[in-house]
Amino acid sequence: MTMHSHPYPHRLSNIVIGYLNLVMLLASIPIIGAGLWLAHGSAATCESALQAPLLAIGFIVLLVSLAGFIGACYHVTWALWLYLLAMLLLVVALLGITVFGMAVTAGGGGRQVPGRPYQEFRIRDYSAWLQKRAQVDRYWRPALACVVGSGACPRIAAWTPMDYLQHSLTPIQSGCCKPPTSCTYNQAGVPVEAQDEDCYRWNNAPGILCYQCDSCKAGVLEQVRRDWHNITILNVMVLVALIAIYSCGCCAFRNARRAEYPYGVNRMSKMNPRWDYFWSRWWNGQREQLY
């Protein structure tokens, strides 16, 4: 008596990847919606910088998940092939971005100010790539607009000297909203001796403050470094998920090929020769006539 294997175990990967890509498809909708909402926002806030990445990620996830869902559920081999190629590119790109981000944000970190609960930051402690971007005007202007629009400095504008002894500061507040703690000024607000260059850049005017100081650029870079380290954790989790889905996609691709050629690929290729079979025979015949 001939034993037949049960078909359902062989289709389990198709079902799994179908559901996974359905979830990815639904998850892309709020991502695209958030990007469109930011695109129509009028305020120049820090979140506006997320507009292009959100839209790009949302549409990529939408297209990739749609191809994977159709290919897995309906055994469409070419859709699964495109899906696996896109997933592989996503994994490689995300891995490259993660490694690059960790490399350029490896340095940095603040120095504790004696007797104060906050830290201060120096731009020379960060990677050369970040320093270069902070020094280039076309990169620094949007970052500075983000700092001003965030309202970080107005929140501590009314602080007294006692508040600086009792409360901590964010990296941006520490670098952009006050002069370095080592600066010494006379009653007219002029530095009394040769000091750090940021001491001369400081101005008490609300629209100037220390926005052009190197310490402000260092504070922005420190915030970027901290945010990127948090994003790295998420990137690793996404990478693990993408690799798992990619593995299921490979199984689904194999099942789709079996469904397309139930008697085997080699046997089907003999019954239905490839498109280049007759062309190859004609070309070989012409070569034999020439020689």
Image: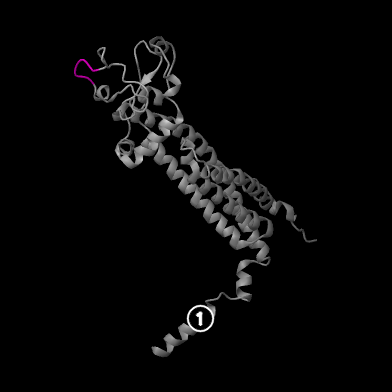
Please give the range of residues in magenta. 190-195
Q: Nearer the viewer, residue 59 or 35?
A: 35
Q: Is residue 289 rendered to the left or right of residue 252?
A: left
Question: Viewer-proximal residue, 191 or 246?
Answer: 191
Q: Is residue 192 above or below residue 225?
A: above
The residue depicted at 43 percent of the width and 23 percent of the height is 154
Circle 1: residue type: Trp
Magenta highlight on residue 213: no
Q: Which residue is mark 1?
A: 279
Total number of numbered discs in the rendering: 1
Quadrant in which residue 171 is drawn: top left
Quadrant holding the C terminus? bottom left
Residue 166 at what x, y percent from top left? 43, 11
Task: Name which quarter of the figure residue 242 lies in.
Answer: top right
Q: Nearer the viewer, residue 273 or 213?
A: 213
- Residue 264 appears in which quarter of the rendering? bottom right
Indicate the secondary structure of the residue bearing disc 1.
helix
Q: Residue at x 35, y 24 (%)?
A: 175
Q: Is residue 96 above or below residue 225?
A: below
Which image quarter is the N terminus in?
Answer: bottom right
In the rendered image, residue 191 lying in the magenta stretch gets the answer yes
Outermost residue, left side: 194
**For residue 82, side relative to residue 71 (left or right):** left
Percent from the top left, x then y, of residue 110?
36, 23
> Taken as a whole, is the magenta stretch helix, strand or loop?
loop
205 and 171: which is toward the camera: 205
